[in-house]
Amino acid sequence: MIMKKNKNVASKNPASHGAGVEFYGSDSDTYDVNESVGYLIKLAHKQLMRNVDAQLQAYDLTAMQWVPLQIISTGRGDTVAGCAREAGIDNGAMTRMLDRLEGKGLVRRQRSNDDRRVVNIALTNAGKKIAREIPPVISNVLNRHLQGFSQHEFELIKDLLKRFLTNGELPTE
C-alpha cells in the first residue's frame, strides 16, 4: 500500500484526521481489489442484503421491497418519483416494485386531488403492520453482523462510514 501526502486533499477538509494521505497509489500493479475499501463495502452490503432477504422471506418480502415501505412509513416519500429519488433508483424500477407491493396489498395508489398527473402512494393497513414488524428483523440482522464489536467500535465504524460518505461529496479538482 502506498501512502503519500496530497496538499489538495488536506486543504479541502483540514479538520479531518489524516488529511492529505493517499491510501491507493496510481500504479495499477500495486492495487489489490481484495484490499479496496470500496470492494469491501460492496461485499459487506451484498452479505447484509442476502441476510436481510433470508429473514424477510417469512414476510414474503425482499430487502429491496422493504425500501419503499420504509420510505413511505417514515414520510420520506409519498409518490413514485419521491420514493425512487430517496431509494436511488429510477422511476421505472420503483413503479415495478410498487406494482408488486400493491399486488401484495401493502400499498395503494391514489391520484392527487391537487394535480391529477401525480400519483400518491400510501401504506395499506397491512403495509403499516409490516412496517412496524420489520425494523426489529433488520436490527437482528445488523446485530449479527456486529457480533464481537465493542460499543466503541460500533460508534467508530459509524463515524468512519459517515466521514467516507462526506468525503465522497467533496468536489473533485
Image: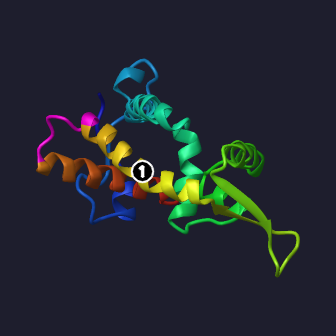
Q: Quadrant of the N terminus?
A: top left
At 61% from the left and 60% from the top, the residue drawn is 123
Q: Residues within 10 Å of mark 1 (few under 14, many from 20)?
A: few
Amino acid of disc 1: Glu
Q: Quadrant of the C terminus?
A: bottom right
- Label 1 belongs to which residue? 133
Residue 138 or 153: which is nearer the viewer?
Answer: 138
At 55% from the left and 35% from the top, the residue drawn is 60
**Residue 111 shown left or right of residue 41 in the figure:** right
Q: Is residue 148 magenta?
A: yes
How many numbered badges does the structure rendering display?
1
Percent from the top left, x then y, of residue 89? 66, 48
Quick one: which residue is furthest to the bottom in this view? 114
**Residue 54 shown left or right of residue 172 in the figure:** left
Magenta residues span 144-150
Percent from the top left, x then y, of residue 73? 53, 62
Residue 162 or 130: which is nearer the viewer?
Answer: 130
Residue 89 or 112: which is nearer the viewer?
Answer: 112
Residue 160 vertical position relative to residue 115 in the rendered view, above or below: above
Q: Is residue 6 magenta?
A: no
Residue 60 makes an appearance in the image: yes
Quick one: which residue is furthest to the front in this view? 125
